[in-house]
Amino acid sequence: MIINKEHTRSLLDLLQKPLSVILVNINTTTLGILDIILYKVQKALLQSDVHSKSDKSPVTVADYGSQVLVSFALEKELPAMAFSLVAEEDSGDLRKEEGKETLQRITELVNDTLASDGTYDVSPLTEENVLRAIDNGKSEGGSHGRHWVLDPIDGTKGFVRGDQYAIALGLLDEGKVVLGVLACPNLPLGSVNSKDPNDKVGCLFSAQIGGGTYMQSLDGSAPVKVHVSATENPEEASFFESYEAAHSSHDLSSSIAKKLGVKAPPVRIDSQAKYGALSRGDGAIYLRFPHKGYREKIWDHAAGYSVVTEAGGVVSDAGGNPLDFSKGRYLDLDTGIIVTNQKLMPSLLKAVKESLSENASAL
Ligand SMILES: Nc1ncnc2c1ncn2[C@@H]1O[C@H](COP(=O)(O)O)[C@@H](OP(=O)(O)O)[C@H]1O
Ligand SMILES: [Mg+2]
Ligand SMILES: [Mg+2]
Ligand SMILES: [Mg+2]
């Protein structure tokens, strides 16, 4: 397995801009701390430091380490605010006998990182501190107050494979997503469809409610405003879906695309990088149809929803209802998630409805 250099970029560095939008003072040195942990984690991954959660999905030291450091830094930087974090990972497996070594490894990495960075003058975190930082993410969210929503690594399968992944942070205010930051370290700056291996990669998308969506390179170019594709013609539209067929029915999306008249083959990539790419018009449609019984989590969509919506796109469930982030850790929705521009949405909804009634067994 080859994990390339982009995996080592600083997570908090990626988050700096939008945090500054809401006037949170996280300084740049602090933001550098995750560089080192990801570099080390990358090496650990080569030693197959990938574990399986109770739902059989993978988690790596990188996922935990990212959650510890984002949680730690947010708590440090937001002392005056009531700090509530809804995040993907929990400490359950790390508290078991079998999780001991992984916990040790995370603690070691976090402490090495904090020490070599030096921004926070703190004594080394104990394993208990690490567990507590992870468990900061236990908030239930909901319709009152402010809640940060974190996916420390979205697209873990892509991360492990060396493909696309994202670090996704959103902010809920009274149940609405008001801020979204999506760092996509492996996404080419020009287009997801770029075939040139020398193209620069690493994109940061950020959106604030009412303020549009901006993209910049991860090494700090000036942000440019981005918009979703304006196409009204499905024949010109290409569509995104999960790389993993287990996450979204490829059969159903293929039937929808056919009905709609989409000519291009699907673009299959991991993570919310799909939302980022769509927000700048790389493709015009994103279809997500998890298999029966799967419940979508808010951290898998909050940042991406904000980035696409502020770029002029529409995100809804398969019934055309807007996504509701105010219900807690899960999104309660009808069947799937579809994303496109305002012009294409009515015909997309029609195609989805017809395909669902003809291919109910595809889910
Ligand atoms: N059976 C399933 N159906 C749909 N989504 C699933 C799934 N199992 C895991 N996922 C979610 O799909 C996300 C990745 O989406 P994508 O397929 O677009 O890359 C995962 O995020 P994590 O990698 O953060 O766990 C996980 O939350
Ligand atoms: Mg996961
Ligand atoms: Mg995720
Ligand atoms: Mg994740």
Image (tube, rainbow, N blue to C red):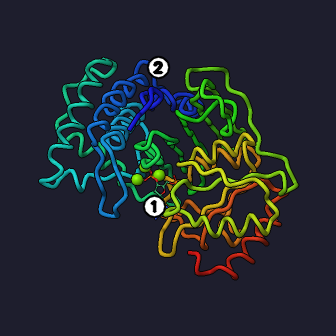
Residue 195's spot in the image, x, y percent? Answer: 66, 34
**Residue 28's disc number:** 2
Q: Tag 1, which secondary structure?
A: loop
State yes or no: discs 1 and 2 in contact (Cβ < 8 Å).
no
Q: Find the residue positioned furthest to the right.
A: 232
User: Few, some or many C-alpha atoms within 10 Å of disc 1 (few <14, some 14-19, many ≥20)?
Assistant: many
Residue 120's spot in the image, x, y percent? Answer: 31, 22
Q: Is residue 190 left or right of residue 70?
A: right
- In depth, the one of 238 and 122 nearer the eye is 238
**Residue 264's disc number:** none
- In depth, the one of 143 and 28 nearer the eye is 28
Q: CA distance from mark 1 to mark 2?
A: 31 Å
Q: Tag 2, which secondary structure?
A: helix
Q: Is residue 304 left or right of residue 280?
A: left
Q: Which residue is mark 1?
A: 329
User: Few, some or many C-alpha atoms within 10 Å of disc 2 (few <14, some 14-19, many ≥20)?
Assistant: few
- In depth, the one of 222 and 138 nearer the eye is 222
Residue 150, visible in the rendered structure: no
Residue 145's spot in the image, x, y percent? Answer: 50, 52
Residue pictured at 56% horizontal, 39% vertical: 181
Quarter of the picture containing the N terminus is top left
Q: Is residue 74 left or right of residue 129?
A: right
Q: The disc labelled 1 sits on which kind of residue?
A: Arg
Of marks 1 and 2, which one's residue comes earlier in the chain? 2
Q: The disc labelled 2 sits on which kind of residue?
A: Thr
Residue 267, visible in the rendered structure: yes
Residue 255's spot in the image, x, y percent? Answer: 70, 70
